[in-house]
Image (cartoon, rainbow, N blue to C red):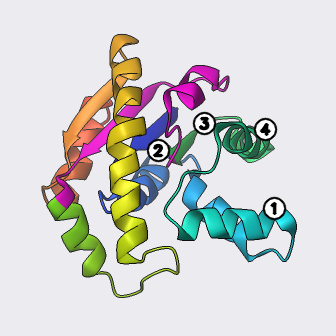
Amino acid sequence: MKIILIGIQGSGKSTQGNLLAEKLNVPYLSTGHIFREIAKEKTPAGRYIKETMNAGYLIPDEKTLEVVSEYLSRPEYEKGYILDGFPRTSTQAESFANGVNKVIYLKVSDQEALKRIAGRKESREDETPHAIQKRIELFHRFTEPVLGYYRVKGELVEVDGEQTIENIFKEILSKLGQAA
């Protein structure tokens, strides 16, 4: 099964992604994690990605598509995946050639997302208040139209992301036609 998780930073994508990966026995892949790994590299690409992420901006469509496609071409993703943090723009959604069964939108308010991020035990270098605010802005401007794209295709599942972790997980499974 090929699933995409969409939601603003702090919506619980990685929590649900890991739970789903274990339940459905498919790998979980976070584009944020991929880009943070690339950002550690002492290369021009690594420095560029680090600076872009730390400023709260999106990695350009062409680069994102290239990196995600390269990862998903690996053998471990042949039977499916749980993909978090992609696509972030309509261009990425329309250009994504890997196919998808369902897109799960974890819907949380900006206030709830900010509260969750502030409450994290470990903060990341790219989680400054400015970068987080910028990412939330960009989510509303660029990623919300992606929801419409998948809604029209009949692939979008909306879930109230402000419930308990367990209830969100049960609702996702139910909407995927899976037993809890």
Asked if residue 77 lies in the magenta stretch, the reply is no
- In this view, the residue farthest toward the bottom is 121
Determine the CA span between mark 1 and mark 3: 28 Å
Looking at the image, residue 142 lies above or below residue 99:
below
Of residues 144 and 71, which is closer to you in this image?
Answer: 144
Magenta span:
84-110
Q: Are marks 3 and 2 in contact (CB under 8 Å)?
A: yes
Between label 1 and label 2, give the one nearer the viewer.
Answer: 1
Q: Secondary structure at mark 2?
A: helix
Which residue carries the number 1 mark? 45
Between label 4 and label 2, give the one nearer the viewer.
Answer: 4
Q: Secondary structure at mark 3?
A: loop
Who comes first in sequence, dot 4 or dot 1?
1
Which residue carries the number 3 mark? 80
Which residue carries the number 2 mark? 24
Between label 1 and label 3, give the one nearer the viewer.
Answer: 1
Question: In the drawing, what numbered circle is on residue 73?
Answer: 4
Which amino acid type corresponds to the residue marked 3 in the rendered image? Gly
Q: Is residue 134 left or right of residue 61?
A: left
Q: Residue at x 56, y 60 (%)?
A: 32
